[in-house]
Amino acid sequence: MNPVDLWNRAYLKKNAVPSFNFSGADVALTIARTVKRLGYYCLISTSERELNFQTPSLVVSIAKALQESGYPVFLNLDHGKSSEIIRRAIDLGFDCIHFDGSDLSLEENITRTKEIVEICRPRGISVEGEVGKIGGSSTLQDESGKTSELTKPEEAIRFAKETQVDILACSFGSAHGLSKEPEILDISILEEIRKHVDVPFVLHGGSGLPQTEIKKAISAGVVKINFNTELRMAWTEGIKEYLNQNSQDIVPVNILTHADLKVEKVVEEKVRMCINSE
């Protein structure tokens, strides 16, 4: 199965594919084990910062080792902006590329996205484009959504038609990170786009969204949902908790195992939110 098959299968079944970011092999393995146990699949993702920290070659080695061991995971570049990093990810064999051209003019965003699609399509690599600015960062914050700019449907329609991306990330009410204010998704943006172009959507900033909003998004055509902040929180809390209780233990395996158990609970919760129970 390739990623495009994933999007089609998810859309037909009214499901979504969760995407989980990782900054180390222990978290990647925890994600993979949890998803396999649940009989589902997911994307394991790295931002440019996470990719540079681990090195591209190591990230690809981790993903390929998991895939060869039978884990249902696909490797995704999240919010790729640098042409050099995107090209490196393509050459190394990433399964999915998210090009984030949201800071560019619409014209330049279309031009650069088309170039990436032309390189990736013959290789069977899925390309995600982005229109509108999805604000915030994968941290704790009070007013992250205020930096967002909602997607204009007419721009998204033109973008999707001209670039022929496999999936489209739109800004429709979510934001990266966690906000104290409840986030309400504006599904009408997606509905208007779907009247004119048949493209599946991506929801960024899935952390903190209630299941009711997640289900609304999936019903409107979202087939990929990104989760990061809550995994970071769980892992960090696990490290702190273990060291508070075992201050003399310096064995990394013991410390990481405790942190990864916290991550496992979050991954399971998010996978179940993405699956249609009807």
Image (cartoon, helix red, strand yellow):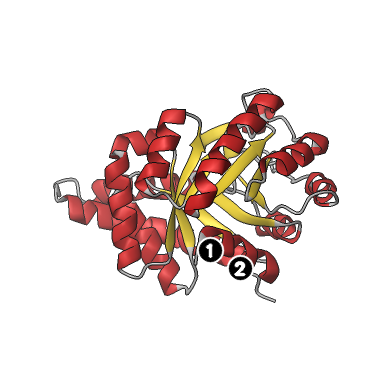
Question: Is residue 3 at least partly visible in the picture?
Answer: yes
x and y percentages locating residue 120 in the rendered image: 51, 46
Q: Nearer the viewer, residue 98 or 124?
A: 124
Q: Nearer the viewer, residue 216 or 70?
A: 70
- Give the image quarter of residue 220: bottom right
In the image, what residue occupies the spot 61% across and 60% down?
A: 7
- Name the disc covering residue 275, or none: 2
User: In this figure, which residue is indicated by the disc labeled 1?
Assistant: 271
State if disc 1 and disc 2 touch (CB < 8 Å).
yes
Mark 2, residues whose alpha carbon is within 10 Å: few (<14), some, or many (≥20)?
some
Residue 172 appears left or right of 98: right
Q: Nearer the viewer, residue 135 or 93?
A: 93
Determine the secondary structure under disc 1. helix
Question: Is residue 179 at least partly visible in the picture?
Answer: no
Identity of the amino acid at label 2?
A: Ile
In the image, what residue occupies the spot 44% across and 66% down?
A: 35
Residue 205 appears left or right of 41: right
Residue 29 appears left or right of 36: left
Mark 1, residues whose alpha carbon is within 10 Å: few (<14), some, or many (≥20)?
many
Q: Is residue 100 above or below residue 63?
A: above
x and y percentages locating residue 30 in the rendered image: 35, 60
- Name the disc covering residue 109, or none: none
Identity of the amino acid at label 1?
A: Val
Marks 2 and 1 sit apart, C-alpha to C-alpha, by 7 Å
In the image, what residue occupies the spot 69% across and 43% down?
A: 182
Determine the secondary structure under disc 2. loop
Total numbered badges shown on the rendered structure: 2
